[in-house]
Image (spheres, rainbow, N blue to C red):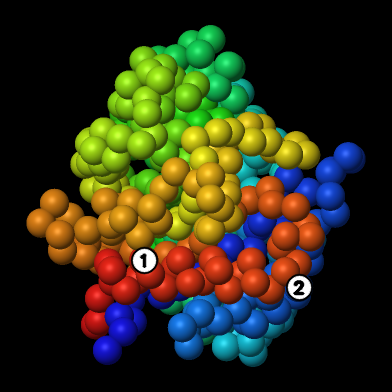
Amino acid sequence: MPNRFPKLHNAMWPGLVGKGSPGAEPAIDLDTMLDMTVKAEADGQKFEGVDLFLFDPHVNIDATDDDIKRLAAKVTDKGLVVGSVVAPVWPPTGGGSAMGLESERGKFIEQVKKACRIAKNLRAEGARSYGVVRIDSAAGVDDWYKDPEGNQKKIAQTFREAGKVAQDFGEKLAAEGEICWGGMHSWRRMVELLEAVDMKGVVGFQADMAHTLLYTMGYNAPEDAILPENYDWKDQSKLDEALKKLTAALRPWTIDFHVAQNNATVHGSGTHDKTGRHCLADDPTGKLDIPRVAGYWLKDDQGRPTRAVQHICWDGCMFPNDVMMKQQTWNNILAAMVKVRDQHGWNA
């Protein structure tokens, strides 16, 4: 019998991230992203849900209760559910830096509060029974390095305040480790931040396979590199050792997980800064054996599923629109997700 958990989700934000700004490709609307998700099939299996970015034109962060009801119906009518949601905490989307002035940090907290309200309402509408609210520091690495210790304390304080807001809504926050976010740009600093926040079970880590590969390389934090300089990617044993060290540190904090591929490079598009390049699941230049590497995150040291996440989500941002409009793209992605669940999932 095939494993039933974790549930397989598709991210809707690849239709938005790096798109819609001057010089960038246009955004892909939510209805189209949902339709591509529903039509995907691999080995007789389908996507079971979606994760959402709470920002226009997909979802207005100031959505009314009736708007949220319509959103819930839009998703569930297609046989899907909602898992995790992304809070628009960045300055261009109405938020503010988690290490900024008090007014900026207040905007950050307010966006988290609005996101938690939508997440809670989706639960009440029967469209959501698991998942987190995703955040990051909304601060650049260069600015962070101007005062590393002082800025890290500010981010921790902001995350702690945001965590208390999430608790009031019955929600959890997951900070997505990416090399482009100050204070979260290296695996060591990420662990340090989570320990400083000290709200395990409420504020945790979101592991993305593409972004965390860059952690091992020390991109933006060479002092925290795990892989040696000029590493030979044909040497699987060294990569395994690096991933074991990385996941031993961050897996205990992981409450949300993104399946992804990366070719050991960075990429930016539109207004999005350079971060770990997301590649297609079947990209021949990809450095990750997706099912193998996912196991480091989804299983403990004894090889048992941690069951720390109820769903896993594909994340592939900044692909060209013509690639995203091909149904085979999503069929191939789903096939990779199925392999991950077959090897590392479980049945209730």
The picture places residue 303, in percent across and down from the top left corner, at: 15, 59
Q: Quadrant of residue 291?
A: bottom left
In the picture as drawn, the residue positioned furthest to the right comes out as 22
Q: Residue at x 84, y 44 (%)?
A: 24
Nearest to the observer: residue 233 or residue 193:
233
Q: Secondary structure at mark 1?
A: helix
Separation of residues labelled 1 and 2 (CA atoms): 26 Å
- Element under disc 2: helix
Give the total of numbered labels: 2
Image coordinates of residue 157 in percent, x first then y, are 42, 32
Q: Residues within 10 Å of mark 1 (few under 14, many from 20)?
A: many
Q: In which quadrant will I find the C terminus? A: bottom left
Q: Give above or below for 115 relative to 42.
A: above
Amino acid at dot 1: Val
299 with respect to 107 (left or right): left
Query: Label 1, on which residue?
Result: 340
